[in-house]
Image (tube, rainbow, N blue to C red):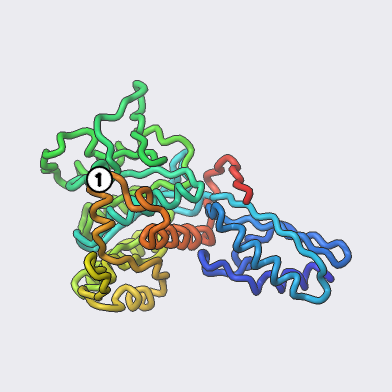
Amino acid sequence: MNKETVMAMLAEVNDENSGRDLVSAGAIREVGIHEDRVSVDVRLGYPLADKGAELAGRIKERLESDPGITAASVNMSQKVMPHKVQEDLKPLDSIANIIAVGSGKGGVGKSTTAVNLAIALQREGARVGMLDADIYGPSIPSMLGVKGQPSTDGEHIIPKEAHGLKVMSIGFLVEEDTAMIWRGPMVTSALQQLLGDTLWGPLDYLIIDLPPGTGDIQLTLAQKIPVAGAIIVTTPQDIALLDARRAVHMFRKVSVPVLGVVENMSTHICTACGHEEAIFGHGGGEQMASDFDIPLLGQLPLTMEIRSSLDAGTPTMMQNQDSPIAKSYRKLALRAAGVLSVMPRSMTLQMPEIVVQS
């Protein structure tokens, strides 16, 4: 048995989250061979919590299926690395990756997706922050059940904390019913201030809930924020898909890679009988992902559970983590983080090494 043979076998083991095999994903750190026993050190570039055991089992099974190997041991670890941002921008200190969640139009569930995505990543073991950049309609404080103004240390704003997330929103700084009648430059300036003046501390991911649409404000924000990747939220409806396509073009115009598409309200599930129906159309998100050659990160139903949990300030990911909806959000989060993990890395920001052994 030799290393080349072992690596060839490992190349047959796919990581469903990154969409790559373990070798091409750069996940194999070390291979040890002692006669007919093999040991493999695998490091993934995203948090995986207890799911790492399942992948380790598949690796072990593949290696031990070879008659030349009598025993295989697998050591799994995870380390989130900073990834490349727009060419003219520099990553923020202590924040490894900023992921922007956008949509071509309002009302498609963008903020709902962003909140549950952030909590799902935190539940996997990542350090996660949440920035509500929807200046005109800041809904994140209500969704997370957080109120009151944040404190300061004299120089920086101390973010609020909720459900394991560090959170900042313009909604903390103004009265709940205040209309934000601001022009584009004011919005951009306010967001940059919220982002730069907040004492986030070390984060693996900062999830930014962008304003809906693809106008001047959204384009300017995408140009000025060092974003590692973007997620587009849409519904299967033709009108929503048209606007979602514009959002993909916008991010690509400013050299922000699109991690994938989330098709929200994919079906409606009746609370009385459980009947499932595609009331907004069928297959739109999947077709869009195919057209742009980007992953379809998930398809989420329209259910009473999602609405009621957010109204209560306890997102689905916290209210019932074993529900089918929560599992869908978790799968979405892992897929997005996995796709990001195999993208080019940043050489300008070195994060402290934090390894989670599984």
Label 1 is placed on what type of residue?
Ala
Q: Picture coordinates of residue 329 (x, y %)?
A: 39, 59
Is residue 148 left or right of 154 when viewed as pictured? Answer: left
How many marks overall?
1
What is the secondary structure assignment of the residue under circle 1? Answer: loop
Residue at 25% in and 64% down: 302
Is residue 27 left or right of 249 when viewed as pictured? Answer: right
Establish if 255 lies above or below 93.
below
Establish if 313 lies above or below 105.
above
- Circle 1 residues within 10 Å: few <14, some 14–19, many ≥20: few
- For the N terminus, the quadrant is bottom right
101 or 343: nearer the eye? 101
Tell me if I can see residue 249 in this picture. Answer: no
Residue at 47% in and 59% down: 334
Establish if 261 lies above or below 126.
below
Establish if 150 lies above or below 272.
above
120 or 293: nearer the eye? 120
271 or 98: nearer the eye? 271
Residue farthest to the right?
A: 35
Q: Picture coordinates of residue 155 (x, y %)?
A: 35, 24
Residue at 15% in and 34% down: 175
Q: Picture coordinates of residue 87 (x, y %)?
A: 43, 54
Residue at 30% in and 43% down: 144
Is residue 128 left or right of 233 when viewed as pictured? Answer: right
Tell me if I can see residue 8 in this picture. Answer: yes
Residue farthest to the front?
A: 273
259 or 279: nearer the eye? 279
The residue labelled by disc 1 is: 312
Is residue 198 left or right of 63 when viewed as pictured? Answer: left
Q: Picture coordinates of residue 352 (x, y %)?
A: 58, 40
